Amino acid sequence: MRERGYERHLPLRECSPLSESWHSSQLTEGKVVRRGDENGFIMPSRIHDNPDFEVVFLGGSTTECLSIPEKQRFPYLTGRLLENQHDMKVNAYNGGKSGSSSNHSVLSLFGKVIPMNADAVVLMHAINDLMFLMTAGSYWAEHYRRGMIQEKHYDPIRKWVTEREINHIFLPSPRTDYDQYRGKPADLDIGRITQSFRKTLELFIFICRQHNIKPVLMTQASRITATPDNFMQAKAKQLKSDFSVEYEDFQEAYSAMNQTIRNVSKQQDVLLIDLAKQIAPDESMMYDSVHFTVKGSQAVAKIVAETLGNMLLPG
């Protein structure tokens, strides 16, 4: 039941503007930094004031690349490779955010990317959409962090202090996002899930084209293969225990998500970067199910730069 005094909003999931946070490193026992620019993109971002080409990367934590050094994250590396290979000034913006689904990226596209007049936007989603759609049932299901509509009690003094003065530093850490669904059988209806995913991909393409931005779809590489390694076998047991989902069914659903990306790309005549077919599904490329190692990030940047350079760059 709704009460007076609550404000509702559509969340702009992003790196907090002008923020700095430290995260566990994939390489060492130390920490790596994530810095946010004034528009909520992960730095380094705007390298040039008068670029020849600007590309924005939207996605979840696999785009964000929190656990590797900031100059090894593939969105940044892609920009530098394009510059070196084509003798031009390139700005590449990392708009990845842990937990985001494709719907959240569409909100970012509409809310802050369109005014930038970017030349291209690269979208990569699969795992977050699959997990949320199979556990929550819909992009519009209520969720304290991942729901499309967020609400909180309106306290202007607290809002001003936390958001402007201490930048959320002392706010309590959120719970694990899927706690509320654990112990409940997930609905792994592949037809329903991929249909919802397809609609969002098509919406992304439509918005880009309406604003003269080149849309680019990218499949998501992973270690979620038909023959799971030891790490994925442990994940399989967790899927079964938490959501009553068999690994084989989950792997089939994940493959269907990537195939949906390929199908939409072909039907909509959109540039496709098929990372799922080009990145080896092993621990040298991803340190867990889907997150890139430094080597994996470097490999992704090389693939993306080559594809963008051949298909999108002027001249």
Image: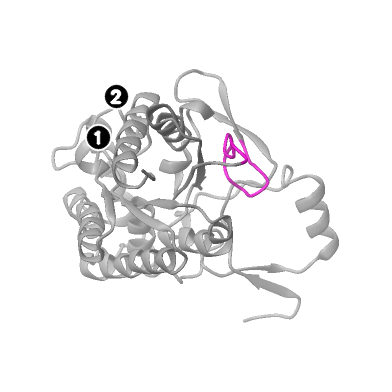
- The residue singled out by tag 1 in the image is 279
Q: Residue 280 location, x and y as percent?
A: 22, 32
Q: Is residue 3 visible?
A: yes
Q: Earlier in the sequence, mark 2 or mark 1?
A: 1
Q: Nearer the viewer, residue 123 or 30?
A: 123
Q: Residue at x 23, y 34 (%)?
A: 281
Kindly identify the residue that appears in the image at 20 percent across and 52 percent down.
Answer: 255
Residue 253 in the figure: left or right of residue 41? left
Callout 2, which amino acid? Answer: Ser
SS for callout 2: loop
Question: What kind of residue is marked 1?
Answer: Ile
Q: Residue at x 65, y 72 (%)?
A: 8
**Where residue 129 sits: x, y (%)?**
37, 58
Q: How many marks?
A: 2
Q: Quick one: label 1, few (<14), some, or many (20+) residues within 10 Å?
A: some
Question: Which residue occupies the extreme front position in the image?
Answer: 315
- With 137 as the anchor, is 262 left or right in this view? left
Indicate the position of residue 115 as horizontal and vertical percent values: 58, 60
Q: Is residue 254 left or right of residue 145?
A: left
The part of the image, by quadrant, that contains residue 101 is bottom left
Query: Does the magenta portion include 56?
Result: no
Q: Is residue 30 left or right of residue 72?
A: right
Image: 56 above or below 234: below
The label shown at residue 85 is none
In this picture, which residue range is highlighted in magenta?
35-49
User: Pointer 2: what residue?
Assistant: 284
Q: Main secondary structure of the magenta part?
A: loop
In front of the other: 297 or 24: 297
Magenta stretch: residue 40 in it? yes
